[in-house]
Structure formats: C-alpha cells, structure tokens
Image (cartoon, rainbow, N blue to C red):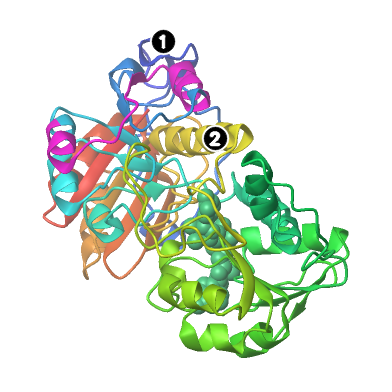
Amino acid sequence: MPRDAPLVQSCAKYGGSREHTLRPPPPGRRVNLKAVQRAMVRAPMTDSASATSFPKSEIKILLLENVHESAHEIFRREGFHVEAMSRALSEDELVEKLAGGVHLLGIRSKTHVTKRVLEAGKRLLSVGAFCIGTNQIDLEAAKIHGVPVFNAPFSNTRSVAELIIGEIVMLSRQLGDRSREVHEGKWRKTATSSYEVRGKTLGIIGYGHIGSQVGVLAEAMGMRVISHDIRPTLPMGNNKAVDSLEALLRTSDFVTLHVPETPQTKNMIGESELSKMKDGAYLLNLSRGTVVDVDALARAITSKKLAGAALDVYPQEPEKNSDDFASVVRGLPNVVLTPHIGGSTAEAQEAIGREVANVLSRFTNTGATTGAVNFPVVELPMADGAHRVLNVHRNVPGVLRDIHRLISDRNANVIAQQLATDPAVGYLVMDLDKEVASDVRKAIAALETSIKTRILY
Ligand code: NAI
C-alpha cells in the first residue's frame, strides 16, 4: 500500500457507526514544542458520542439512591453498562463495589465518598453528585486520585425559590397553624397577626442561583428586595445590595438564607444576629442546617421576638424516612417545618438526572471537566483524525518537560493540547497522531508523576 493511502477503520465496536480515516504522518515530521506550549490549538469539533478507546458496554456505572430515570436513559443511549440501586451504600459496601471495577459513580446526598472509598476505586474515572451539595464527598482526595466530581448546580433552583415564596405567604398568614387547627376540628377564624406580603422587605442572604431567583419572584408579588453576599453580584430587578449583614437584618421583615455550608456560614444566624432582626420578623432557612443556631431560634420564637420561621434543613437530619426527627423547633407556633424537600420536585429530579448524566458522559467521551467542583477545567474540542491522551499528574516542576520529551522522542505530532493546573494536580489533554498516541499514553502513564492516564479514540 502506498505510504499515504488512507486506511478506513470502522468504529462500530466502540458503540458508534462512524468510519475513521487514518493517514500515516509524512516522513520525518517532528513535534513543534514551541507551538505546543503556545498550545490551546482550537481544532474543529467532531461528534464525539462514540469516541472511547474502551467498548462502551464495558464502562460500568453504579447509580445509588434512586437517581432519576432520565440519567439511566442518557447512559443507556451512550451504550454504558448501568447498575442502579435505590439505597445509599455504607463505606464498606462502597469499597467492595468500587474494587470490583466501577468507572462512574452516581450518588445523591446520603452516600459518603471517603478517602478509603476513593483508594479502592482503582478504575474510577469520575463521581456524579445528582444533587447540589458535594459535602458528602472528600473532594480533595478525589482530586488527588484524578477523579473529577460533578454536580447539578442549577437544576432545582426554581423548585427551592418557589417553595420560599409559598412559605413567605404561609408565615405571614400563619397558614401552617390554621391548617393544623382545622384538621383537628378547630375553627379559629381570625385576622390577628395576618398580613399581606406586598410592600414588605425581603432580605436575601447569599445572592447566588437560588437567592436571585427568589428576589425576582418576590418582586413580582410587590415585595421590596435587599440582599447581602460576600462577593459582588449583579442585582436583578430592583434588588438593592446592602453593605452588611447587620444592615440587612435590621431592615428586613423576612430574612431568607441561601448560602453554602462553609466555616464562615456555620451558625451565621445565632443569638446576636436574631436580636438585631426587627421585632415580629420572620426567618427562613432552606439552605444548610448548620447555618442557623436552632436553639437560639427556638428562644426567639418562644419570646415572640420573631413572629415565625420556616426550616427545611437542620443541623442533624434523620438518615432515613423511617427515623424519628428530634429538634427544639418542633411544636413551636407559626414555625413551618419541612423534611429537606426544597429541591424535591419531579421537574428538579428529572433535570438533575439529565444535567449530571450529560456532564459525566461528556467527561467520559471527551475528557471535558467544565463544571467539575474539584478539578482544573479543561475543555478541548475533539480534533478530527486524532487520538486523545488525557493525563492527570502531580503538579511538580518538570512534569511538562518530561511529557514533551516523550512526545518528541516518538516524533509525534501534537494536533491540539490544553493544560490546566491547581496547586496539587495538573490535567493535560492532548490530541495526537493516531499512530503514536497509544505508545505515548503508555510512556506518560509510566511517569512517576502520573496519577491517571487514559486514551480516547
Ligand atoms: P450559589 O452558590 O449559587 O449561591 C450561594 C451564594 O452565597 C453565593 O453567591 C456566595 O457568594 C454566597 N455566600 C457564600 N458565603 C457567604 C456568606 N458568608 N455571607 C453571604 N453570602 C455568602 O448556591 P445556590 O444554588 O443558590 O444554593 C444555596 C444553598 O441552598 C446551598 O447551601 C444549597 O446546598 C442549598 N440548597 C438547598 C436545597 C434544599 O433542598 N433545601 C436544594 C438546593 C440547594
């Protein structure tokens, strides 16, 4: 066969039906290291749905805690092998499962992905948190093991925001108490302590995805909206950002919390903050249980400092639906308690399933880490006619030099390359000539600094 004759290879065994055209490189072509280092070559995007070096049916996905069917559908369409379980697994159970060779793990909030679990998951490529929070995962350990973690930051935003609006009305009309009384056969028709929400001030602490949606909806009901965040944010509608938490607490009729769980937000609303709130104001926490000191809140309700509160999250939450719930806030007047259902709607669950399954599939097929919560972000369009080598390495001096030497030694042509680092790890994605990519992958994988190396074609 003449040297430049195209070889046509079917990709069907990888679950796709495309044909790839392979051309041997021109003789003597050498890697241009300068160009590589300038890198970030933007190659044309190709259909990557079938791009995997591994038979797709052998990519094993373990989905726990009743991950929505919408995710199963996406994985099935990709041709991956899916095992689904309705419950969370204990650490020991998870270690055993992962040691059996799981490539992608999908969890919700109850499964804990610890360092030990990650050490057992030798084949683990990525973890998908089919929820918002990722506190249940040891993110640092995952990164050190070359495992990006993805979540669904926006899919249930609207569900939480709508519940907040409903609860603002509930609190200002004491609907929880009135409803309970009528269920008990008591008729207490009264206008005492019942108010419209129109014209009242809503103070939003944490003006992120949910906080800003709440503000938009609240304005539609005629509320005045103010907010406080630790970072500069773009105010939506007529919302006004206030300078300090104290300013917000002193002027709001309703205070709603939409912050993440961090050391700074732990008990950020305690005795002192509650005392700064207006007499007869209301507090809503549908963010994280540790953000409010519930003992102090119970005292503020009992002393009538506050006229009511709505809580969806608690410092200690039951593990299972059948477990009892104990809390000092139970049984208090005009306190609406819900069992962490802020984001639990059919729409949100379906959207979360789709969102996380799509990013996991994309990462598996192309190596893209956009949206990962613990990993350097690389998003390199797939180049035509190339094989892709993906390498996670310890971020120590000399790694790139070693990798580029390996490439150069093999006379390999780098078609595109992108590197992103953080202090602990570097993530390098390279598109190379098909003829050399496998050899380069093996050589890079053998470097002492390499954590995880794979190839896609
Ligand atoms: P986000 O990340 O979009 O917004 C959080 C905002 O809080 C950011 O703008 C951040 O700058 C700000 N922030 C962080 N620390 C702060 C501090 N000390 N003081 C003031 N602002 C601070 O998050 P998103 O999606 O809006 O979620 C907010 C919270 O809601 C999270 O804790 C999340 O876990 C919780 N959540 C609860 C659900 C439920 O079922 N009840 C469902 C979905 C989310």
Report whether 421 appears left or right of 216: left
User: The C terminus is located in which quarter?
Assistant: top left
Crowd band around label 2 with a 10 angstrom C-alpha radius: few (<14), some (14–19), many (20+): many
Q: State the residue position of label 1.
A: 12
Q: Residue at x 29, y 47 (%)?
A: 147
**How far apart are labels 2 and 1 at the CA level?**
33 Å
Q: Is residue 326 magenta?
A: no
Question: Please, is residue 158 above or below residue 454 in the view?
Answer: below
Does residue 336 lie above or below 361 as drawn?
Answer: below
Residue 219: numbered disc: none
Q: x%, y% of residue 333?
A: 58, 63
Displayed-image quarter of ligand 1: bottom right
Residue located beneath label 2 in the image:
349
**Vertical position of residue 311 compared to residue 454: above or below:** below
> What amino acid is found at the position of numbered circle 1 in the picture?
Ala
- Looking at the picture, how far across and down is residue 301, in whole percent? 56, 73
Residue 361 seen in this snapshot: yes
